[in-house]
Amino acid sequence: MTRVTEQTDVTSLRIIVVEDNHELRDILVTGLRYFGHHLLGVGDGPALDKTLAESAADIVILDLGLPGEDGISIARRLRSSHSCGIVMVTARGRLDERVLGHETGADLYFVKPVDIRELNAAMINLARRLFKKSEPAWRFSARTSTLQTPHGMTIPLTAQECILMQKLLELPGTNVSRRDIFAALNQPDDLYADKRLEALVSRLRGKVKSADAASELPVRARHNLGYAFLDEVAV
């Protein structure tokens, strides 16, 4: 998960609940929303992937017995590609099942039925550990039109590169559509728009690599939907 320098407000977390039982999903979403968190509920792995492609999450709550890809497999993928907290809430309560959940990457493991108050308290403690304030990896200044790498190398940006960074960092970690980027750059969304944007991102990657061979610009294209900046950054 991408974070700016301000410490995450652990009393207002972005949480995605992955539960195929509509009633149980609604109970978790409604119950945790009462504590001031921002909740989204989905029913399976593909729906989770789509949601994460559009918006970052602080914590993902996983049921294990999901249709298609099960929660164990999803947790493995999350652990390798995201820094969000993983909380398993499941009917599987045997010791070997709990151990497998933790080995797979669960930060917390609850056996249903779960008390919402206990779940909320445990997730807040988890968030405090996960999101301790730290120095950001990257630094961006619109005033000076510069980007600084994690190793302290400062890269001067062109006007278009600076606008691109400003747009991506409005909500770090969140997908920004190509159309929104074209509008920010004051460029037409025509036949050549995608190529121009790809060239702009490619040039910026090259500038970063030339200035700091050990760093790679953490801007990723997401399933032809747009781009996202996927690292901590100070703005």
Image: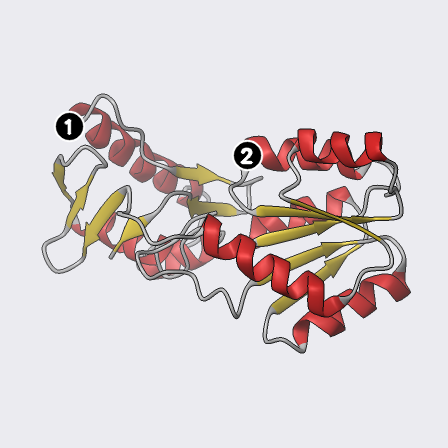
| Image x and y of residue 18, in percent | 76, 52
Between disc 1 and disc 2, the foreground one is 2
**Residue drawn at x 35%, y 47% as measured from the top left:** 232
From this viewpoint, which residue is outermost toward the front? 95
Q: What element carries label 1?
A: helix
Q: In this view, does 25 lie above or below 230?
A: below
Instruction: Check disc 2 and report its element: helix, strand or loop.
Output: helix
223 on left or right of 18? left
Q: List x then y, in percent, for residue 37.
A: 59, 70
Q: Which residue is label 2 attached to?
A: 81
Q: What's the residue type where badge 2 is placed?
A: Ser
Residue 108 visible, this orientation: yes
Taking the spot 83% from the left edge, 34% from the top edge, the residue there is 95
Which residue lies under the disc numbered 1?
A: 211
> Is 159 rendered above or below residue 66?
below
Q: Which amino acid does label 1 sit on?
A: Ala
- The residue carrying pointer 1 sits among few (fewer than 14), some (14 to 19) or many (20 or more) residues within 10 Å by Cα, namely some
Q: Distance between the residues labelled 1 and 2?
A: 26 Å
Q: In which quarter of the image is residue 184?
A: bottom left
Q: Which residue is drawn at 45% across and 45% down?
A: 227
Relative to 9, is 37 on the left or the right? right
In the displayed structure, would residue 9 be above or below residue 87? below
Quarter-of-image position of residue 148: top left
